Amino acid sequence: MVVARQRDVIQHIREEEADGYSDDSLFRISSWGADLSFRELIQRYDDDELVKPELQRNYVWDKIEASRFVDSLLLGLPVPSIFLAQTDDEKLLIVDGYQRIMTVRDYVRGVFSGDGRAFRLSRSRKVNSRWQGKAFVELDEAEQRRIRNTTIHAIIFVQKHPKDDDTSLFQVFERINTSGRTLLPQEIRNCVAQGGLNRLLFELNGDSQWRELFGLPQPECRMRDMEFILRFFALSSPEYHRGSTERLSLKQFLDTFMKAHTNPDTEELDVLRGRFLRSVDLVYRAFGSSAFHNVSPSDPDKLVPKFSPTLCDSILIAADSALSGGYQPAEYPELERRSLLQDDDYRFAITKETMSRTCIDKRVSMAANRLFGLQV
């Protein structure tokens, strides 16, 4: 049942992922190559000079994949290049190559990140028989040196222009990816915009009421749920209200918003945290766990068991406005919500041209008025 619900939630969210943007800015990026040994990469990682994407970018290789990579190093086979970005504080951010670097680090230290157990090479026939089942300490000294001293070609880049806008990093992450799956927008933001706001999103994503409203008991592994928390902050921000274009590129706007607010001070973080948690609490108490579920087009008395991004936008932002502006809750809130969902103007705003400012503003103002008695 949980698996089926998760599939429904993700399928519905993918409708929102068609949004993209073409950034026509001219970037000047310097890049250079360097051959780095795994000994050096591991040391830099342990010294916090080589930085993995913050909090998540989970280790995803299984034991056979990891063992095959170590096997390739022992056999002296060439391995693909990695991509690193130089940060403002002279550290190197891993853009592509995290699995390879972590595999060798894990093997040398003897613990496999995939399961936390002792790292012995797989006994699969895909691994050379002379090394099957062996831990690093069980290799002879020459083999240990071969792994540590193997060099991997790194392509290192840094953006030189424009100085005050490093959004080229989002495009680099999006276009350079050899890990076997395309990173989703929030996964890229998690890599590029590391800081206090990113950590807050992880914290808020674990809130029990939000988890029920989103429809999954555990955080979604591709970070789609985190994106909707970011979306709540961005679409209710002064930056949104200062915008002038009718059609909003949501992806670009969220990229820009998250970079602009990477490291809020403690007071701003407290304000953001409070706004989200109080709004979620109000919505949950008023409408229950199905607050962001639409009604069936064929049967208005039946709810569709899918999370609706545009319902989340409108109702959660309306709740935030209600809490800051004084409000009169509807006497029968769920009946009023059902009535709102059957309003033709509201249905248009949550299903058609959903990223036009006209529709965003319309659905928020209608939710605020009908559900909380506000004029927005």
Image (cartoon, grey):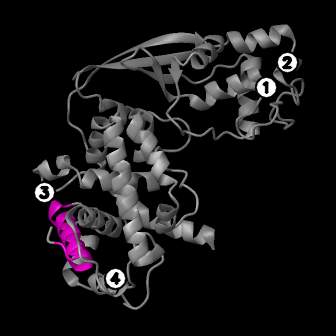
> Residue 133 at x, y = what percent?
88, 30
Give the amino acid type for the residue marked by disc 2 in the picture: Val
Residue at the spot of label 4 = 333
Give the amino acid type for the residue marked by disc 4 in the picture: Pro
Q: Which element carries disc 2, helix, strand or loop? A: helix
Indicate left or right for 75 with 318 as reference.
right
Q: Is residue 125 above or below residue 327?
A: above
Give the amino acid type for the residue marked by disc 1 in the picture: Gly
Count the numbered circles shown. Answer: 4
Mark 1 crowd level (few <14, some 14–19, many ≥20, 10 Å Cα): some
Residue at the spot of label 1 = 110
Residue at the spot of label 2 = 137
* Tag 1 and tag 3, C-beta contact below 8 Å: no
Q: Give the magenta part as a residue range.
A: 356-374
* Tag 2 and tag 1, C-beta contact below 8 Å: yes
Which mark is in front, 4 or 2? 4
* Tag 4 and tag 2, C-beta contact below 8 Å: no
> Between marks 4 and 2, how big is the CA–CA gap?
65 Å
> Between marks 2 and 3, how big is the CA–CA gap?
62 Å
> Residue 188 at x, y = what percent?
42, 40
Q: Is residue 284 above or below residue 93?
A: below
* Tag 1 and tag 4, C-beta contact below 8 Å: no
Indicate left or right for 184 with 252 as reference.
right
Q: Of callouts 1 and 4, which one flags the residue occurring earlier in the amino acid sequence?
A: 1
Residue at the spot of label 3 = 246
